[in-house]
Structures are given as C-alpha cells and as structure tokens.
Amino acid sequence: MRTLNTNLLLFLALTLLKIQMATAFHVYVINNLGDYTNLTAHCRSKETDLGTRVLEFGAAFDWDFDLGHGFEYWCDMSWAVSHGDFQVFYEPKDAERCGDQKCYWRIDRDGLYLYIKSEDDYKLQFTWP
C-alpha cells in the first residue's frame, strides 16, 4: 500500500509539472541594432508593467507567463533615430506561430523581426514609424 501511495503521489506531481511546463510561455526582445547602439524598451500587458530596460547590443529583455488568459503584451521601444510602440505578443495569434512556448523578437535598424517556427526563420513584422 505504501508503494502505491508513493507512486500515486509521484505520478500526480509529474502530471502537475508537465501541465505547468506546457502552459508556460517565454518572450524575448533582443537588441540587434549593432555595436554601441542601445535599445530602450518598456514592456507591459494590461495586468503587468514589466518596467523599462536599456539593452546593449546582443542583450535581451525577457519574461514568462502562463498561457490560457488571452494575454497581450506591448513594448514601447526607442533607439538613436526611431521610436515605436509594438504588440509583441497576442495569445490567439502568437502562441502557435512562435512555437515551442517561446517568441523571439530581433530588433534591427529596419524593424522588428519575429522568429516563425514553421518557417525556421525571422520574418519582418513591423518597421519603425
């Protein structure tokens, strides 16, 4: 009986961990503007203000959250010559196209590129205003 209880508890713990891992999602905003060009990003959802960060070339602003709540995240970004406010995650659209519970945004001088899992490539989504 003791082995049955231990096995049942282990099974339940692993099941809960699997469910939690399957619903966790991670977003990365990566500065690819070039050497000596900082990116300032203020990211937020309706529920959470993630704050403002200054990213050096190659650095990332990243966060995670659980899917299933219809989350939408925006980032107000600026660098030496450009500024814009961009939707970087919208659950109904991005949970599937990003793939593997991760969205990677590469911020370049001509715009914002999102890694699309099905195409195995970064695709331009937004240009700077």
Image: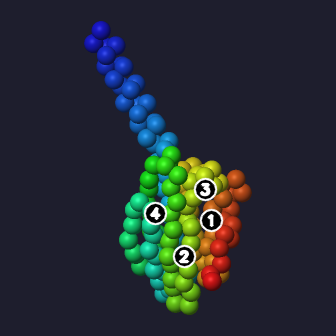
Q: Nearer the viewer, residue 45 or 112?
A: 45
Q: Are marks 1 and 3 in contact (CB under 8 Å)?
A: yes
Indicate which disc, 2 or 1, sits on the residue closer to the N terminus: 2
Judge from the rendering whether residue 47 lies leftward or rightward of residue 113; answer left or right.
Answer: left
Q: Please name the amino acid that badge 4 sits on.
A: Ser
Q: Nearer the viewer, mark 3 or mark 4?
A: 4
Tell me the amino acid under the disc marked 3.
Asp
Q: Which residue matches tag 4? A: 45
Which of the two labelled residues, at mark 4 and mark 1, occupies the earlier sequence position? 4
**Mark 2 vs mark 3: in front:** 2
Mark 1 / mark 3, whichever is N-terminal: 3
* Residue 76 vertical position relative to residue 47 in the rendered view, above or below: below
Residue 77 can be seen in this image: yes
As measured in the structure, the alpha-carbon distance from the residue carrying label 3 to the one carrying label 4 is 15 Å
**Element at label 2:** strand
Q: Amino acid at mark 2?
A: Asp
Q: Nearer the viewer, mark 1 or mark 3?
A: 3
Badge 4, how many Cα within 10 Å: few under 14, some, many 20+? some
Q: CA distance from mark 2 to mark 1?
A: 15 Å
Q: Which residue is mark 2?
A: 85
Disc sitting over residue 114 in the figure: 1
Q: Position of residue 128 (x, y in %)?
A: 62, 81
The residues bearing labels 2 and 3 have C-alpha atoms spaced at a distance of 17 Å
Query: Residue type at mark 1?
Result: Leu
Q: Which residue is mark 3?
A: 94
